[in-house]
Structures are given as C-alpha cells and as structure tokens.
Amino acid sequence: MRIVAPFRPFPPENELHQELSDFDWNEAIRMLFHSVAIACRCEAHVITDVDTHLPLPALKYATTHRRLMLWNIEVCLRYLESDDFDQDTVMLDADQLVYHDLSKFFIPGVDLAVLVRPTLKHRDSWKKVLNGVQFWSYRGKARLVHFYRQALEIAEALPEDLQRWGGDTQALRQLLEPIELGTLQQRAGLTVQMLDYAQVLEALCETQIKWLGEGRMPISSRAVLDFRWRRKTFMKRVYEATVLSLPTAVGR
C-alpha cells in the first residue's frame, strides 16, 4: 500500500485561505508522513507537478490546470494513469494525521472507497462526499482512470463559484449519485464502497482543543484526524502531543 497527498502551492482564492497564508504546508505534510510511517508502515509521497520543488518525497507529473479545485482532480488522474500506480493507494489531504492502519479499509472487489456524510443536513449538498480520504484499488486501475477523466471534464464545466471552492468534490459527487451507504454500488463504471465517514475520520473538535490546552490529548480512536479550516493552526501541537508520544516515534 502507498499513501499519496496532492499538493502544490497556490495563491489563495478565498478569504479563509488568505487568513491561513502563513500555514506551513511542508511541515504539515512531514507530520502527516511521520504519522503514516508509524500507523501504516508504508511509503508516502506528495503527488505534484514537474515544476514544483518540495523538500519531501514526491511523484511528479505534467499538469495544465492552475486552479486548486481543477488541479486536485488532474494530479490524481495523472498518478492513476502513471506506472507509479502499481499498488493499492490511499489518497489523503495534507492537513491530516493518521493513527491507525488504513489498509483494513480496502475491500475485495471494490475499485474505489469514499467517505460520505449520511445526514439530512448535507442531503442536498456537494458536502455529502468527503473527498479528502479515498481508497484506490490497483485492480481497478483502468476503471479509475476513466472515472477521473470524467470527473475532470465535469469540473472544467462547473460554474465559477465551484471552481473557486468545492468543485473537486462536486465532480465526484455527480458521478457517485445517488449516495447510498453499505452495500457495493456500481457507479460510472466502478464498483464503489460508500463508507460512513465516522468509521474512518474525525475532525478536530472543541473538546479535543480543550484537552490539548489541559495537556491530556488522547490518541484518536479513528484512523484519520482532520484539521479543517482554522483548526489547522492546532496541527503541530496535536502532532507533538500524540504522534511524538507513541512508543515507535523516533523523530521526524
């Protein structure tokens, strides 16, 4: 199994990204990869483009899009098309930490596993799909390539507001509808498993931030801890309080 994290520095396109302009993405990815090494004991790489130079293990591909939402889909497609995609792969967002082995979420016969929100709150929203954790089965390589080519075509035709934010998720959602938990689904040529996100991921919450301030941050019971929006600023403190406290942690 391999872990990949798409990343290329982009100018901020919205107010929140401007507020987080000082966030150290390279350091975030180093922390992510260290957590992966402990929890999953597998290799991890940034997937990026040929003109991006990072102080991190990276797989590089020629890309054409220079807007984040479209680029995210394109760089994933380039990885899936490449000879580098030679084993089961988990795609993760860069602002996450991993605490438990992700290989257990690969299910025989499934090409793509994605996380979804099964709540009424998100019933009519592109936010029903959480695309920051995806499980790509090597056996489905050709089908995944076709799926991601369709996703890129959809994303390129989306309105401006979605191309600025949310378009990468919206494209996948259109191909995956209807969203149904549990049994295997056939969608856009793929066998898909839609997992309740709570089986795999939790977002850093106010209670955990309180615990962090009290010096008693427990290890997450979920495989992935996500640092959404402004909570990215807590990522290093959580990493130091949890990942570096694990018996197998030997530094970065």
Image (cartoon, rainbow, N blue to C red):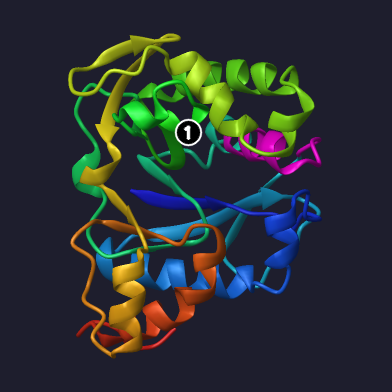
Tell me if 155 is positioned left or right of 35 in this view: right
> Residue at horizontal 74%, vertical 17%?
157
On the image, which quarter does residue 220 sit in?
Answer: bottom left
> Residue at horizontal 50%, vertical 61%?
95
On the image, which quarter does residue 135 sit in?
Answer: top left
Tell me if 134 is positioned left or right of 74 in this view: left
Residue 16: percent from the left, percent from the top? 68, 57
Residue 168: percent from the left, percent from the top? 60, 32
Residue 164: percent from the left, percent from the top? 74, 38
Tell me if 230 is positioned left or right of 225 in this view: right
Toward the viewer: 42 or 150? 150
- From the viewer's perspective, is residue 125 above or below residue 25? above
Q: Is residue 11 visible?
A: yes
Q: Is residue 77 visible?
A: no
Tell me if 9 is positioned left or right of 243 in this view: right
Please, which residue is most extreme toward the front here?
A: 121
Q: Quick check: is 35 in the magenta stretch?
A: no
Highlighted magenta segment, given as a residue range: 63-76
| Number of numbered labels in the structure image | 1
Q: Quick check: is 75 in the magenta stretch?
A: yes
Question: Which residue is identified by label 1?
Answer: 127
Toward the viewer: 194 or 88? 194
* Amino acid type, callout 1: Lys
Rate crowding at label 1 as few (under 14), some (14 to 19) or many (20 or more) other CA atoms within 10 Å. Answer: some
- From the viewer's perspective, is residue 181 above or below residue 6? above
